[in-house]
Amino acid sequence: MPLLVGTAEFNEQEHLTIGGCDTVRLAEKYGTPLFVYDVAHIRERARGFKQTFNSLGVKNKVIYASKAFCCLAMYKLLEEEELGCDVVSAGEIFTAIKGGMSPKNIEFHGNNKTKEELLYAVEQGVGMIIIDNFYEIELLSAILKETGKKQHVMFRITPGVDAETHEYILTGQEDSKFGFDVNSGQATQALEKILADERLILKGAHCHIGSQIFSAEGFLAAVEKMLLILNDWKKAFNYTVDVLNMGGGFGVQYTEADDPLEPEAFVKAIVNAVKGQCELLDYTFPEIWIEPGRSIIAEAGTTIYTVGSQKVIPDVRHYVSVDGGMGDNIRPALYDAIYDGFLANRISKETPEEMRIVGKYCESGDILIKTIELPPLKPEDLFAMTSTGAYGYSMANNYNRNLKPAVVFVENGQDKLVIRRETYEDLIALDCE
């Protein structure tokens, strides 16, 4: 029987296990830093969203936000779980299709889609394009005219709703680079332009109020605002949406201090709010789409590091360096993101000490965890940093010409390499002498 320490499982050798796999053995096999994804957790979260919608009898679509983490194996998994995906570049479209995603289940986002990207999306048969600005209306319309095609579209509006989150991941407010602003009348102008273009088949409206949101209140306010806007358009243009896309941003637990709602609770709150507003306004109940990314993948991921040098400054700080850092997780430096972690290769009964976990990159800001209490660590110990599944590998970089880590999927005691570790030859593959 595995030992339980907190919410982590350790085997008889006192090694952390994930998905039934010994992380010490994974580190020996694949090296560190290493991203380890618990596939069962991903499936559970994905099914939780869909099953809740279905239990409520609501026509829906759950669309995974690729930017959180994507690779061929991830798209294959999404197709198995019958989820769609949203993409924000031609590269993500290419990867999704190569990974087995049906183009009709792909939704294309972005505030500055290029002509080449839009043409590629149209040619590949991408199911939905979310129009973000007036320039894009003109660009897409011209492409459709040239190709003789029609395209299902939605358009993104900023309803003027703020969410309790970091400024850099706040997107639903009036002052945002995304979408058509409502208060200035731009959203209404966009609606008129899209409705007037016979090649653009308008399916509905989209909004996204931010990320890492713990409360349903922001979504309830957004639903209320969106339905009032849609009802005004019904009166003015005799137009009702088929689909209301409420975006994503559902919060996850990075540390014990985080207390997010379960995904099912967000779904129920949104559905009930839409039903209530539709009944109040006598508006036809639409199909509801959501775009979870972080809430499906974040807690499924753990990064395994090897401990290296340490520096103790008496009465000031104890630094512990690991063999990764801001190259595989830039979020602490970018957002002041807070993570948790623990010793992975042994269970220690020694008195915990306060320390700072830092990376190997040549920046003072390369800090993974500012303050954490851990038992004394030794060189070659393994440190597991939890909930790193979202925006870790997807934002990874080669700063200081360090190699990007490998990524492993684990399920039912089986491990599968899904992204190999980079090599030095990979680093210079694009260089020209």
Image: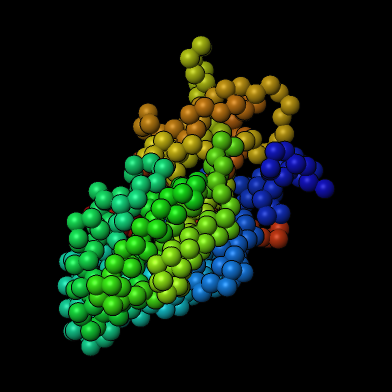
Q: Give the camera-side residue of 57 and 296.
A: 57
Residue 313 visible at all: yes
Residue furthest right in the image: 1
Image quadrant assignment for residue 219: bottom left
Lateral position of residue 115 relative to residue 3, left or right: left
Residue furthest bottom in the image: 148
Residue at x-position 71% and y-position 58%: 413
Residue at x-position 34% and y-position 75%: 240
Lateral position of residue 282 relative to residue 351, left or right: left
Above or below residue 170? Residue 40 is below
- The x, y position of residue 333, in whole percent, is 39, 37
- The x, y position of residue 226, in whole percent, is 36, 61
Q: Give the camera-side residue of 313 and 80.
A: 80
Residue at x-position 51% and y-position 11%: 315
Above or below residue 363? Residue 43 is below
- The x, y position of residue 295, in whole percent, is 52, 54
Q: Which color scheme did the rendering employ for the protein?
A: rainbow
- The x, y position of residue 255, in whole percent, is 56, 38
Above or below residue 421? Residue 11 is above
Image quadrant assignment for residue 106: bottom left
Residue 405 visible at all: no
Residue at x-position 64% and y-position 35%: 343
Lateral position of residue 146 relative to residue 337, left or right: left
Q: Quadrant of the C terminus?
A: bottom left
Image quadrant assignment for residue 14: top right
Lateral position of residue 225 relative to residue 116, left or right: right
Number of numbered tags placed on the structure image: 0
